[in-house]
Structure formats: structure tokens, C-alpha cells
Amino acid sequence: MRVAIDARKVHDFGIGTYIRNLLRHLARLDHDTEYVLLCRESDLQLAAQLGPNFRSVCEPSPNYSLREQIHVPWVLRRERPDVFHAPHYVLPFGVPCRSVVTIHDCIHLVFPQYLPHRVAQAYATAAMWAATRRSDRILTVSEASKRDILRLFNVAPEKVDVVHNAIDEGFSVTPTDEQMARIRERYQLNHRFALYVGNIKPHKNLTRLIEAFSAVRRSGLDDLTLLIIGDAISKLPVLRRAVHSHQLHKHVRFLGYMTDDALTVLYRLASVFVFPSLYEGFGLPPLEAMACGTPVVTSNVSSLPEVAGDAAVLVDPYDTESIADGMRRVLTDPALAEDLRRKGLQRAREFSWTRSVEKTLQVYRDVATRGTERGE
């Protein structure tokens, strides 16, 4: 069997994490299949790091471009894979082989107001509609996302397979005392802090998080700081306005991108991890926090209850006071915080990249076998 995988987004924040873990675990699990990776020129060495059954070919087309609609099928005709895996919702027209597409979420259709313009909305709708119709199987990362796909695109339920994400193994490794001390000193973390990790797009609901944090401080927990890890604040000026309107410029810190090693320490140093997102296909940061033994407060919508189970305090993300109350409960009730730590560690172990990639590999085999049976 020969499988081609579009790896152009391997360095992205969300989909990149998915691609990196997919490739890493395929290399561990499967030494017989030939894998052809469509890569940027700068990533052509990627296959050599994985094993002798991996091979990279250059695919220079920009994502979401007209060129990829032409060039990706041309590369696939030359390489002649049995299955092509598009790890995000764009499946180019003219793909000459059987295909699998991963649709992580339907946020562009659920929250079209967060797209920059109507053209972007039209593109996302058309691309996802085409992918659901033309692919042989659809992978998605939660039952919540599967329900959205079935509702929005009217595809057969048996065509959609739920394959959960999982955390990188490094988050389960306890940092040394020296590593903990180094991060604490570098960022001057001398007081309790609440932590958020992720990008700062509007659906992440950070304006309400800042308002809830302000309410928590006003209720007597005025030693608390809020750390926001991810994009720079300049990408969403409304957050800067929220910070200043509540006079929190000394208490809310935007630290930008962090390596996984630094995140592993920050999760463990945090008194509470707060993730009040309005919509997630899966929601990996709460699971990372759980793996680090950090009490989690997260939303009671979309996939987040599915991921968190009973190991988090679930709040209404549209209600600032609900978010604030969840934070206060964790910060003022040591028994609750300890119970969440224990349950969170157990919950994180229930998600495994090995099991998820085994399921993905079986989908590849099923799709390739059906193609052979039909004489394709």
C-alpha cells in the first residue's frame, strides 16, 4: 500500500500538532506501507527522520490557493498512491486516487462572523462541502465535530470516523526542580496565577476571561495574575482595551509563543487553567493541563465536556460570572483542586496517539482495500 499525506502544514499550531503526531506514530507502528509526504522545500528532510518507508516530495503550492488545486493532483498522478490523506478540510479537485480528509471542526460555518470577509466564508463552505462529498472517508476529532458535520453536510454517519487527538508525551514527563526554578525566575512568577494557553482568536472568548479575572480579583483574590500564552496581544486590539478598561495592565501578562518544555513547567506552576472557548473541534490545551496535574476550568459547550469528562469544572462561556465562579471555586477550595488534579491525570491517560493513529491506519487500509476490490 502507498499512502500520500499532505504535510505542508506540519509547523502550524493546531493542524501541525496533528500532522507531527500522525507521522511520528505511523513511523513507529507501520514499517510496510510506503508513505509519500507532500512537503515544503524546507521540509524535504522530514521523511529521512521517520524511516526508510517514508519519502518526501516537494509541493510548493500555498495553502488555500488555486495552484494547489492543480499541482497537488499532478503530483499524485505522478506518485500513484492508493490513498491520499488531506489532514485539513481542503481536498483539491482532480485528486486521482481514493482519499481521506480530516475535518477538525466546523467553526467557519458555526461562527462565520469571525472570518475576515464573505469571500473567506464562501471558500470555506465550498471547500468543506466538496471534501465531505468527494472523499471516501472523513476523520474528525470528537463526537461533537461529527454531529456538526452530519448536521451541516448531510453525509452518511458511517462515512465519518471519530479519532480523538491526544497530548504529546512530553507533557506527562515531570520537569526537574532546576527547570521549574528557571521558568519561575525568568518570568518572575512569585504569586499565584491563572493560565490560558492557545491562540487569541475571537471564539476563544478571552474578553470574557479578562472580565471574569477582574471579578475574581475584586472578590478578594487580589494576589492573582493571569498569564495568556499564545499569539501577541497586537493581533486582537480589543483585548488590550479590555485589560486597560479594568485597570489590569499590571496583572494580565501576554507571553506569546512558548516551547512545549516551557509550557510543561507553566502548566504545573499554575493554580488553575482556564479555557472558556465558545467552540472547539477537540480542545487540546485542557487535556495538556490535566496531564500536568493542573486543575481545569473550561466551557460546557461543543467538544469540551467530551474531552474533560468529570475532571474539570464546566462553566457557561457566555456568562462572565459563571467563568469567575468556576475560577473562585478552584482557587478557594483545596479539596476540589486536589480532586481535579487526580481526575485530570487519569482523564489524560485515556487519550493516546498510538491508539488514534492505529485507527487512522486501519481507515487507510479499508479505503485502499475497497479501491482494489472495485478494480481502481
Image (cartoon, grey):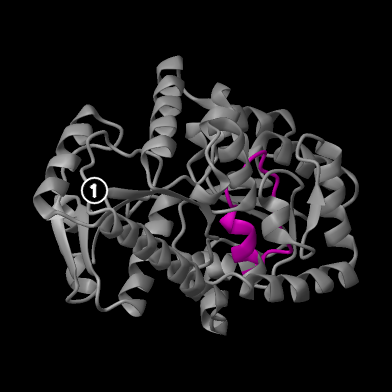
Q: Quadrant of residue 287?
A: bottom right
Q: Is residue 240 left or right of residue 75?
A: right
Residue at the image position 87 percent from the left and 43 percent from the top:
218
Residue that lies at the very extreme toward the front in this rendered image: 374
Reading the image, the residue beneath label 1 is 97
Residue 164 screen position, x and y as percent: 55, 60
Residue 193, position as x, y percentages in the image: 71, 58
Q: Where's residue 129, x and y in %?
A: 44, 31
In the displayed structure, does residue 330 sit left or right of residue 254? Answer: right
Kindly tell me whether residue 211 is visible in this rendering: yes
Can you tell which quarter of the image residue 22 is in? bottom left
Q: Residue at x 44, y 68 (%)?
A: 357
Q: Quadrant of residue 328?
A: bottom right
At x 24%, y 48%, the residue is: 97
Residues rendered magenta in the picture: 268-289
Residue 222 seen in this snapshot: no
Neighbourhood count class around disc 1 (C-alpha, 10 Å): few under 14, some 14–19, many 20 upward: some
Query: Which residue is at the front of the view, 337 or 124?
Result: 124
Q: Residue at x 39, y 24 (%)?
A: 123
10, above or below 170, in the image: above
